[in-house]
Amino acid sequence: MKIGHIAVFTDDMETSIKFYELLGGKKAMSDVLTAPDGTSKKLVHMEFEDGATVELVEPSQKDIIPKGAGICEHFCFDVENVDETVKNLKEKGINTFDKEEPYILDILGNIKIIFLTGPSGELIELFQRL
């Protein structure tokens, strides 16, 4: 098995689409699901080069969107060079990183990581195996 997609709530679909485009995603699917009670969810799949997909979910009932840390603690993008990725994202105007510089951890062999926050509060890890 492999992960099909990671779903992230948003209360501002356009802001989330722009953010994930800056991370390298492309809009692959867009739809609206409407339940019999009249509530709906806008869905957009942002697909990345390796086939990973982040599904953005904007419900018509904004009060069901969790605030702060959600059920998903974080999700991760594997990158070839964390430093270069951070530099490129900062040049594009993304600066929601948890630290000034990536850090190296001696787990799973040596790894270099940094976290950033998406527009809906989702925690995203950039991961490089050294």
Image (cartoon, rainbow, N blue to C red):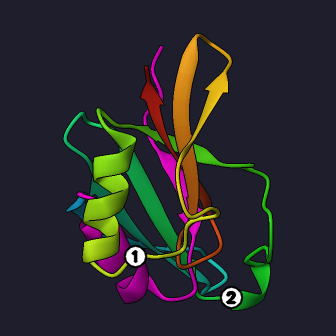
Please tell me which residue is depicted at 52% across the width and 33% down the height of the picture.
Answer: 112
Q: Tag 1: residue type?
A: Ile
Please tell me which residue is depicted at 40% across the width and 76% down the height of the picture.
Answer: 94
Residue 20 lies within the magenta run: yes
Q: Which residues are magenta?
A: 1-24
Name the secondary structure under disc 2: loop
Residue 5 lies within the magenta run: yes
Q: Quadrant of residue 108?
A: top right
Residue receiving disc 2 = 61
Q: Residue 94 got which mark?
A: 1
Inter-mark Cα distance, 1 to 2: 28 Å
Give the image location of residue 62, x and y in percent.
Answer: 69, 89
> Which of the two discs, 1 and 2, labels the residue nearer the N terminus?
2
Please tell me which residue is depicted at 78% across the width and 61% down the height of the picture.
Answer: 70
121 left or right of 48 in image: right
Q: Choose between 60 and 71: the one closer to the eye.
A: 71
Please tell me which residue is depicted at 58% across the width and 10% down the height of the picture.
Answer: 109
* Residue 48 sits above or below residue 122 on the image: above
